[in-house]
Image: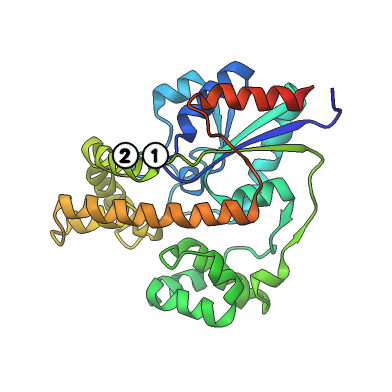
Amino acid sequence: MPSDPLVIVLLGPTASGKTALSLGIAERLGLPVINVDSRQLYREMDLGTAKPTAAQQARVPHHLLDLRPPDQPITLQEFQAEANPCIDAVLKREGMALLVGGSGLYLKALTSGLRPPAVPPQPQLRRQLDALGQTICHPLLQAADPAAAARIAPADAVRTQRALEVLYASGQPMSRQATAEPPPWRVLELGLDPVDLRGRIQQRTEQLYSDGLVEETQRLAERYGDNLPLLQTIGYGEALKVLAGAMQTAEAIRITSQRTRQFAKRQRTWFRRQHNPHWLESNDSEAEAMTLIERHLR
């Protein structure tokens, strides 16, 4: 058996079936699931992030969920400071670990040992950027650090602010400061990209609204304010408009589904350019995944 521990990465666009497959793999291997979804890091954001349910978390232990309240943004460096010891502990105990998520940059940072700039949060600057709004901030980033802007979606206020924060605090673009030191693991990347993704996205979007996305958004807005950057992300942004009477639920579902498809397209592009997974293509993806894993454990 190879001496280096094995880190299994299950990746894929949103709504591709990662949660269900990860539970099956985790149960068969006796492993916890280590979350690498950037929005699931925050407490109280459950439906809108498609976080594993209480029943699913009862089936298999999950790590790196609910790390902070949503008004305390987590930088990539802070996420790594939480994730790396967690991975090391599971590897020491089990000899392998299972990472699951669709946040490409976070996955890449862990598997390649990316070291982002060590710039602490700048609360005053963040308040100023909040006041400017994302429609101004993202073009500012495009002008100052085009490479970073190309990796950050125009609607992603959290990452846009972080890139501007690094730029203004250090005087150097984030894209020029990152270095990498690969960790001492073997990595097996498994990818999900089902042909029926469009229908899966539509079905899940309808289910999220049926399950209470608007009500969850209302609770978050009442506690943290409707200008919370994470409430501008997919699903929550449309639900806010429903609450304000500016949009009907049917239209919110349509736009959420559309934004989700656009996001999934960006995820697919990232995974194909930045990763080299074994794409699971059989009707029994769990069996196919286990065959690949067992091959790497020999």
Is residue 166 left or right of 184 when viewed as pictured?
A: left
Alpha carbons under labels 1 and 2: distance apart? 9 Å
Kind of residue indicated by mark 2? Arg
Look at mark 1 in the image and give the residue it sits on: 50
User: Looking at the image, which is closer to me, 3 or 240?
Assistant: 3
* Tag 1 near tag 2, CB within 8 Å: yes
Is residue 292 left or right of 128 when viewed as pictured?
A: right
Q: 10 Å neighbourhood of mark 1: few (<14), some, or many (≥20)?
A: some
Picture coordinates of residue 36, whole percent (x, y): 56, 42
Which color scheme does this rendered protein use?
rainbow
Quarter-wise, where is residue 86 in the image?
top right
Kind of residue indicated by mark 1? Ala
Residue 204, label in figure: 2
User: Looking at the image, which is closer to me, 253 or 177?
Assistant: 253
Location of the N terminus (image quadrant): top right
The residue drawn where x is 49% and y is 42% is: 193
Location of the C terminus (image quadrant): top right
Q: 10 Å neighbourhood of mark 2: few (<14), some, or many (≥20)?
A: some
The residue drawn where x is 67% and y is 52% is: 109
SS class, disc 2: helix
